Amino acid sequence: MLSCACVSLSGGQGKTTVAFFLSLLLASQGKRVLAIDCDPQANLTFYLNHEVAANQPSLLEVLTGAVTTEDGIYPTQHSNLFLIPADRSLFKVSDYLINSGTGAFILKLRLRNVQSLFDYVIIDVQPSRSQICLTAVGASDTVLIPVEATTKGVNSLIDTLDFLQDQTSIMAFTGQILGVIPFRDRWVGNTQTIEGKENIAAMKEFAGDIPLLSSIRESEQFKRAIRKGKLLSELGHSDLQYPFEQIIKILTHE
Ligand code: ATP
Ligand code: MG
C-alpha cells in the first residue's frame, strides 16, 4: 500500500481535483484505492457522492479510535474505489490530536490494519497547518503539491515547501515529494498566457530539485467531469487527463 497526499496550504489550489481524478483513474485501472477526506469542508466526500449520516462513522471516529478503521470505510459508485468520508464534525478532531501527544502519527497508525486491503491511499488535505494536515502528512509516503499558476499559487508553494521541511526536520514527514502540479494553467489557443508562463517559471525556481509535473489546463471540462462523476477520458477529453496519467506512472515506480 502506497499513500499519497495532495497538500497545498492555500485554498483553491487543485488538491481535491487532483485527489478525485487520481483516485478514479487508479481505480479504473484495477487498483484498489482508498480515498481519505482530510478536510472538514468535505469536498472530496461530496465529489464521490457520499453523505455522512448522523449515526455513521466518518474520519473523525476513525482518527479518535471510536470505531475500527474498516468501519469507517465505505464503497463508492466506482468499482475498486473506497472512501473514508468527512463532514464538518472533523473540526472537532483537533483537540483529540493535540492531546494525544503524537497527533502527526495517528492516521498512519489507523491505516496499519487495512494495509493489505488497498494498493493506494489518496489523501485530500485541508489547506492549513492544522492538526488534521499534520496527521495526513504524517501518514503519507508521497506528497503532491498542486498550485495555481498565479502569484497566490507561487506563495502557496513557498508555504507548503516550508511546512514540509519543518515536518521533515522533526521526522513527522518521512515521505517523498513527488512533484509540483501547476493548476489552472491558461492557454489561449496554442499560446500559454504570460501570467501562467511567468508563475510556472517562478515555481520551478522555488521547487529546486523537486520535479515540476505536467500542468492541469484551465478548462470547464474538469468541473463537468466532477459533476458527472466521470473521468475526463470518458467525456472525450483524454488530452486533459494527461497530468493524472503522468502521476500514476511516477507512483507505480515508487
Ligand atoms: P480548497 O483549498 O478549498 O480545498 P482545493 O485546493 O481542493 O481547494 P479544488 O477544489 O480542487 O481546489 O479546485 C478549486 C476550484 O477549481 C474548484 O471549484 C474546481 O471545480 C475548479 N477547477 C477544477 N479543475 C479546474 C480546471 N482545470 N480549470 C478550471 N477550474 C477548475
Ligand atoms: Mg479541496
Image (cartoon, helix red, strand yellow):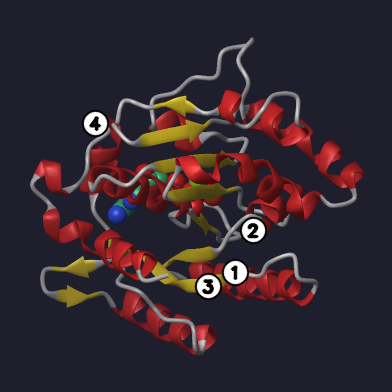
Q: Amino acid at mark 4?
A: Lys
Q: Which mark is residue 222?
A: none
For the residues labelled 3 and 1, say whether their Cβ atoms are less than 8 Å apart.
yes
Density class for disc 4 (Cα within 10 Å; few <14, some 14-19, many ≥20) is few
Which residue lies under the disc numbered 3? 177
The reply to whether the C-beta atoms of the residues labelled 4 and 1 are less than 8 Å apart is: no
- Asked if residue 21 shows in the view, the reply is yes
Residue at point 23%, 40% (across, down): 225
C-alpha separation, residue under disc 3 versus residue under disc 4: 31 Å
Residue at image mark 1:
175
Residue assigned mark 2:
137
Q: Amino acid at mark 1?
A: Gly
Q: Is mark 3 within 8 Å of ligand 1?
A: no
Mark 1 near mark 2, Cβ–Cβ under 8 Å?
A: yes
Q: Residue furthest top?
A: 55
Estimate the x, y position of residue 157 in percent, counting from the top left.
55, 72
